[in-house]
Amino acid sequence: MAVTRLPSTIHEPLLWEYAESRESTEIVEIDDRYGLFIDGEMRKPESGNYFPTINPATEEELAMVAEAGEPDVDAAVVAARNAYEGEWGSMPPPERAKLIFRIARMVQERSRELAVLETMDGGKPIKESRDVDLPLVAAHFFYYAGWADKLEYAFPGLDPKPLGVAGQVIPWNFPLLMLAWKVAPALATGNAVVLKPAETTPLTALAFAQLTSEAGLPPGALNVVTGAGGTGALVVSHPDVDKVAFTGSTHVGKLIQDELAGSSKRLTLELGGKAAHVIFEDAPLDQAIEGVINGIFFNQGHVCCAGSRLLVEESIHDRFVDKLKRRLTTLRVGDPMDKNTDVGAINSRAQLEKINELVDSGVSEGAEMFQPDCVLPERGFFFKPTLFTGVSQSHRIAQEEIFGPVLSIMSFRTPQEAVEKANNTPYGLSAGVWTTKGSRILWMADRLKAGVVWANTFNKFDPASPFGGYKESGFGREGGRHGLLAYLDWGDG
Ligand code: NDP
């Protein structure tokens, strides 16, 4: 609560206490029960089954959501096929572009409501859903709307054609943004979509689907089927789906790749990561500290490209770690709806258990743990921002994706050693380098096996910039002109 007690005499010091600043949830209306969005309307699931979606910051149930089974997924794919072969598929590209622009503008107009809903359903701090997720969602739709009537200029002489029906499965860490990364290029290229949001974060996808109807998107061009992994598997394996786009764990990505092997379905996979964040001694240290904090604590570390392995040049290791610890103690952890919160709620109890298990392994394997002395809310799923020093490369916390607010710190002596350690992972999604030497940035970027290398910054996203992985982080690119490729075929086959 907000209290600033004024001193009664000039000798008594001013007492400053924290004043929270809660975003109101009144702007959001949540129904008790949600159906499936198929062929432009909300439908009851054939099975009659529903599952709860909860607010991970309070553990309160927000709504019951339909679980799509085989007949529902089939109906969604049939609706998508009909839209593709009907009104949506035959729509002239400039009209398609106008519709996607309209969707982008409506996302902007309703961004406050969508941001609040995203935070309630997923637990991320409101300042992130408001200032990062929603602006990027709108930017993706604006960007791809621009391409919709210019595809022949994007790929001159190739006569690009849509693939048909795209089945898309997305995770819970950026529910609306991952939707935008997938739906915007699919619609811009004239495909119809069946989307499966994550079980723990279905609400913004359903709100978005209704928004597209209001925008005038023809029925069936976008269908949203909610459910758990089984529903995702039904989407992926449906025989009339032409293209599968998946973002999530490497484990499930491998299952999907196995399933689709030998079929004519096109596939893109955006999987896990264990990014190295490399700090050279000549780096601007205060800025690097902010970059490291943003790299691992943004969205509670539920970020596939999170900078979860910090490699610090040995000469500055101790000084850098001291600064980092000091900065950790200033992070505000707790109610995601408070506009000052830096680290919100962990998305689910299951994810919290996974983080706990890996952090325990770090302690038992001999790394030294540091956590700030902050008080966590009594209800909800929360985890203190954590860092480990004395980490060796074989420790599980240096190898496995924790997907939580946990940083593993190691040191290096030469740029060659930094590259070797950075690349010593089955993943290859992203990396970061901090140094004042431009030539060293280029030298490192050439050698780091990562789809994205940030220099003197981290977690910067732009719809015009392609994003994707190497090795077990997947294949295919989302964003930019490259992002169109996954949804196009060439006229002459
Ligand atoms: P999953 O890979 O299980 O989930 C991602 C999406 O795939 C969800 O919509 C999920 O449904 C769905 N899904 C699950 N099983 C299948 C299947 N057999 N076929 C098709 N779709 C399926 O990730 P989790 O949510 O279980 O998270 C586990 C770990 O994965 C995290 O700790 C993290 O390490 C990593 N992860 C990485 C992400 C990334 O962006 N790279 C994103 C999310 C997780 P449902 O949610 O309903 O189960």
Image (cartoon, rainbow, N blue to C red):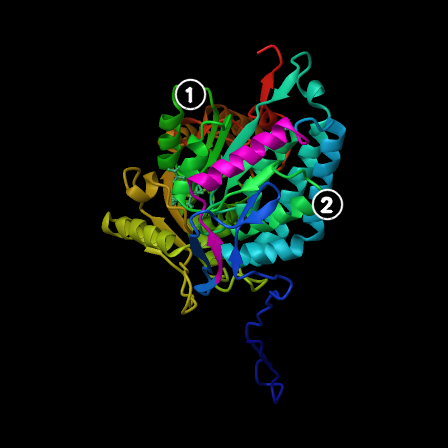
Numbered disc in front, either 1 or 2:
1
The residue singled out by tag 1 in the image is 263
Ligand 1 is within 8 Å of the C-beta of the residue at disc 2: no
> Quarter-wise, where is residue 482 in the image?
top right
Give the crowd class for mark 1: few <14, some 14-19, many >=20 residues within 10 Å.
few
- Residues 64 and 335: in front is 64
Picture residue at 67% right of the left edge, 48% below the top: 107
Depth check, front residue: 113 or 301: 113
Query: Seen in the image, is 214 located left or right of residue 171?
Result: right
| Residue 401 tag number | none
User: What type is the residue that disc 1 sits on?
Assistant: Ser
Residue in the image at 40% along x and 25% along y: 260
Label 1 sits on a secondary structure element that is loop
x and y percentages locating residue 307 in the rendered image: 46, 42
Q: Quadrant of the N terminus?
A: bottom right
Q: Are marks 1 and 2 in contact (CB under 8 Å)?
A: no
The residue labelled by disc 2 is 105
- Residue 416 placement (x, y as % from top left): 40, 27
Residue closest to the eye, 300 or 67: 67
Asked whether residue 274 appears in the rendered view, the answer is no
Q: Is 334 drawn above or below residue 72 in the view shown?
A: below
**Residues rendered magenta in the picture:** 62-88
Image location (x, y in percent) of residue 402: 37, 46
| Residue in the foreground of this view, choosing between 413 and 275 | 275
Q: Amino acid at mark 2?
A: Arg
Indicate the quadrant of ligand 1 in the picture: top left
